[in-house]
Structures are given as structure tokens and as C-alpha cells.
């Protein structure tokens, strides 16, 4: 499948109009909490790192946060006034705006590279941005570094699809000192190159060596240069999280809510078309590997909803691909346009875009239900109402109906895995 050259109007849409239409309203309606200037938990450590020598080591050298140096370093390049921590947080928020802009532009380009129609690309970007943790969270709690992790994740996936394999090497080296979670993409990109290049030789061996060695060097460099004030073991931390949660009966209902907090309406999109989803994953197995490896990130922390972030772009890709038959006909079908509007509105509702966040404690209970106390009835009723409305709208509007709908597009220029 040949991709048409980008027209000037599409460049304007994907590079300016669409990202600004998403980011500016969310920025304007999402204040940073006044409590400690938005500082609590992880952001306190990252902001202390951005302040460099003016912050105490008991805050700036706490593992594992102290080894994620890239984003705090970029923030430290801005002049930080005497206010210290609150001023640093505002710089995090400005960096989040720029990073989110680039993420949305790259996601649009990623979907285009995969052969998605223009309407499908816009749908994918809007669906991604409607999830609370992708954009809104980075403005409400900008002291986290997840917004740059997402930028690197999407950049690596775009390089994978575009077969810019050598460009991945410096990206993974940066990812190693930004947030090590991005390294979970390594098996997926290796599989993609393996499937795309059945004739392997010395260049492939050199690339694979670089894929493993460069991030390892970056990790060694930062960990040998930053001595933490605490004892930290990733294995012990993961074991503690798993033992405390997996055996806790109260964890599982909260985890179910966290799935929809972390992924919005995307699970419903895949559940409606299970056979198409399964076929896509058979034909393009690297996307399944992205999700499988992303699931392991759930063991890395307590707040499960936010930990779905690394796999979210891949799930957007799958959802857009399996719904491509409907999305490609949107300009000719009023029913499909209505369905699209309902889907995006319900997704934004799940992403808490239509309600004030409230105080930090109340927001945490809604957004990270692992921490919720008391009855979960209200949260499950919210999810059930959204699911019921969406399934009803999909059944009535039948957006996939019509003989002119094409199948979902394969990745251009590469045979499907099922053809081997």
C-alpha cells in the first residue's frame, strides 16, 4: 500500500490544528493543585532533581526516581526563581505541553504509516487524548515524568513501523535514563525486524547488539554517577507489590475499575470485535508483544491505572485497525459519524474531562481506584452506564454495516506473519 504525500492541509491539521484543539482546552481547565504546589510522592523527588544542588539529597537522591534524570535535567535548563519547588513544577507543566504536542503529532504519523484513513487517524488521536492519564494528568500533576516516557514510546513505535531501526538505538539510550519502562518495547521491535528481514546478516547482528548494549551503557552510566540515599531493589519492590495485591481479595474489584481508568473506552472497542482483534494480533504479532510486555509494568507500582500508559499507543493502533472499516466510511455515513461522536464523548467522560477533579484525596480515589476506600458501587455503576450506552449505540447505529467497507489495512510493505 502506497502512502500519499502529505498535503499542506493535512500537515496543518496534524501538526497544529488537531494538537492545539486538544491541548489548549485541557491546559486551560486543568489547574495544578495548590497543595504543595502540586508536589506529592514522585513529583517531589523529580522536582528536587531539577533544582540540583539547591535541594537536599534526601529528596534528590531517592531510588529509583533519582536514576530517571532526563526530564528533570531538561526542566533544570529553565531559570528557576527563589520560589524553588513551585516554580520548577510550572516548568514541568510547560515541558509537558511541548512533549504532549509531539506525542500527538507522532501518533497521527504512526497511524498514517499503518495505512489508516484520515478520519481513523483523527479518531485514534482523540481517543488517546481522551484517556485521563495521557494528557490531562500531565497538566494536573506535571511533576511526573510519564509525558516524556509516552513521547519516547510513540517515537520508538513510529521508528519500528517506518523501519528506522538504527534511529531506535539512541532513542532507547535516552529511554534508559528517562524512565526504564520504555525498555519493555525491546522484544517487540526485535520481533518486528526479525519478521521484516528474513534474510539476516552482520548488520542485523550489529543492530541487535546495539539495541542491548547502548541502553545498558546508559543505565550503568547514570546509576554509577548517582548514589541513592536509600537501599532499593527492583526485584524486592515488585515482589512486595505482587504479594500485597494479588492475594488481596479487595484488590481485584479495584483493578477492574483501574482498567477503564487507564484505558478509557478502548477495551470495549476491542471486545466488540474479538475475532478481528485476534486476527490482527496473529497477523501483526509485534503489537501483542508490546501489550504483553506492557502488562509486566503493572507489577512496578501500586497505582495500576497510570501503569497502563506504555501499552496505550499499541491498543489505540489495534482499535483503529479493527474499526478501520467503519472509520474509512465516516464521510459517507451519518450513522458512523453519530457513533464516532458517542464513542469519543463517552471516552472523554471516562477520562474525567467533564467534571472538576476536586481535592487531591477525592481525585486520587476516582482516578487510582486501588486507593479508594469504602463502597465501589458508584464507580462500577459509572462504568456499567458507559458500557451500556456504548453497546446500545453501537448495536443501533451499526457503524460496520455496509458492503463498501474495506478490511483493516496491513502494515504497508511487509507481509503478515500469518503469510509466512
Image (tube, rainbow, N blue to C red):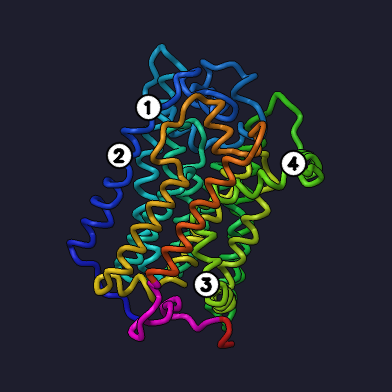
Mark 2, mark 3: which one is toward the viewer?
3
- Residue at image coords 66%, 47%: 255
Mark 4, mark 1: which one is toward the viewer?
4
User: According to the image, label 1 marks what residue?
Assistant: 78
In the figure, is residue 123 to the left or right of 278? left
Q: Secondary structure at mark 4?
A: loop
Up-down relation of residue 266 to residue 419 (above or below):
above
Mark 4, mark 2: which one is toward the viewer?
4
Considering only order in the chain, which callout, 3 or 2, is on the residue closer to the N terminus? 2
User: According to the image, label 2 marks what residue?
Assistant: 25
Say if mark 1 contacts mark 2, CB within 8 Å: no
Instruction: Give the magenta-colored segment's residue range.
Output: 398-416
User: According to the image, label 3 marks what residue?
Assistant: 273
Residue 339 rendering spot, x and y as whole percentages: 36, 64
Between 19 and 205, the one nearer to me in the picture: 19
- The N terminus appears in which quarter of the rendering? bottom left
Considering only order in the chain, which callout, 2 or 4, is on the residue closer to the N terminus? 2
Q: Quadrant of residue 352?
A: top left
Q: Secondary structure at mark 2?
A: helix
Give the distance between the C-alpha atoms of the residues marked 4 and 2, in whole angstroms: 37 Å
Considering only order in the chain, which callout, 1 or 4, is on the residue closer to the N terminus? 1
- The C terminus appears in which quarter of the rendering? bottom right
- Residue at image coords 25%, 74%: 332
Q: Label 1: few (<14), some or many (≥20) within 10 Å?
A: few
Considering only order in the chain, which callout, 4 or 3, is on the residue closer to the N terminus? 4
Give the distance between the C-alpha atoms of the residues marked 4 and 1, in whole angstroms: 44 Å
Between 34 and 66, the one nearer to me in the picture: 34
- Residue at image coords 39%, 43%: 99
Up-down relation of residue 334 to residue 61 (above or below):
below
Q: Label 4: few (<14), some or many (≥20) within 10 Å?
A: few
Amino acid at each position: 500500500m502506497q502512502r500519499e504525500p502529505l498535503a499542506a492541509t493535512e500537515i496543518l491539521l496534524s501538526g497544529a490544528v488537531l494538537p492545539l484543539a486538544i491541548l489548549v482546552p485541557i491546559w486551560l481547565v486543568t489547574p495544578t493543585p495548590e497543595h504543595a504546589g502540586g508536589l506529592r510522592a514522585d513529583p517531589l523527588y523529580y522536582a528536587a532533581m531539577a533544582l540540583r544542588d539547591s535541594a537536599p539529597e534526601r529528596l534528590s537522591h531517592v531510588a529509583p526516581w533519582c536514576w530517571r534524570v532526563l526530564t528533570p535535567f531538561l526542566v533544570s535548563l529553565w531559570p528557576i526563581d527563589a520560589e524553588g519547588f513551585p516554580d520548577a513544577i510550572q516548568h514541568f507543566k510547560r515541558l509537558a505541553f511541548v512533549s504532549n504536542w509531539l506525542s500527538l503529532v507522532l501518533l497521527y504519523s504512526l497511524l498514517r504509516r499503518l495505512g489508516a484513513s484520515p478520519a481513523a487517524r483523527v479518531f485514534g488521536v482523540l481517543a488517546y487524548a481522551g484517556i485521563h492519564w495521557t494528557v490531562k494528568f500531565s497538566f494536573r500533576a506535571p511533576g511526573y515524568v510519564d509525558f516524556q516516557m509516552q513521547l519516547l514510546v510513540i517515537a520508538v513505535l513510529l521508528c519500528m513501523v517506518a523501519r528506522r531501526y538504527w534511529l531506535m538505538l539512541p532513542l532507547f539510550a535516552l529511554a534508559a535514563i528517562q524512565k526504564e519502562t520504555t525498555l519493555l518495547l525491546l522484544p517487540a521491535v526485535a520481533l518486528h525486524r526479525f519478521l521484516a528481514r528474513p534474510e539476516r546478516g552482520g548488520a542485523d547482528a550489529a543492530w541487535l547488539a546495539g539495541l542491548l548494549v547502548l541502553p545498558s551503557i546508559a543505565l550503568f552510566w547514570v546509576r554509577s554517577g548517582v548514589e541513592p540515599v536509600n537501599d532499593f531493589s527492583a526485584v524486592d519492590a515488585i515482589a512486595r507489590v505482587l504479594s500485597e495485591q494479588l492475594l488481596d481479595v479487595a484488590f481485584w474489584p479495584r483493578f477492574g475499575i483501574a482498567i477503564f481508568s487507564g484505558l478509557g473506552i478502548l477495551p470495549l472497542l476491542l471486545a466488540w470485535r474479538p475475532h478481528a482483534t485476534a486476527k490482527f494480533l496473529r497477523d501483526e504479532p509485534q503489537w501483542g508483544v508490546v501489550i504483553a510486555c506492557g502488562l509486566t509494568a503493572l507489577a512496578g507500582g501500586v497505582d495500576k491505572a497510570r501503569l497502563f500508559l506504555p501499552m496505550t499507543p499499541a491498543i489505540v493502533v489495534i482499535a483503529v485497525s479493527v474499526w478501520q472499516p467503519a472509520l474509512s466510511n465516516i464521510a459517507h455515513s451519518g450513522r458512523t459519524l453519530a457513533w464516532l461522536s458517542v464513542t469519543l464523548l463517552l471516552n472523554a467522560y471516562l477520562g474525567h474531562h467533564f467534571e472538576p477533579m476536586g481535592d487531591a484525596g477525592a481525585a486520587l480515589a476516582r482516578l487510582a481506584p486501588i486507593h479508594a476506600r469504602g463502597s465501589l458501587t458508584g464507580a462500577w455503576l459509572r462504568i456499567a452506564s458507559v458500557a451500556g450506552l456504548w453497546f446500545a449505540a453501537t448495536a443501533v447505529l451499526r457503524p460496520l454495516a455496509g458492503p463498501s467497507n474495506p478490511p483493516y489495512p496491513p502494515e504497508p510493505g511487509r507481509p503478515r506473519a500469518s503469510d509466512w
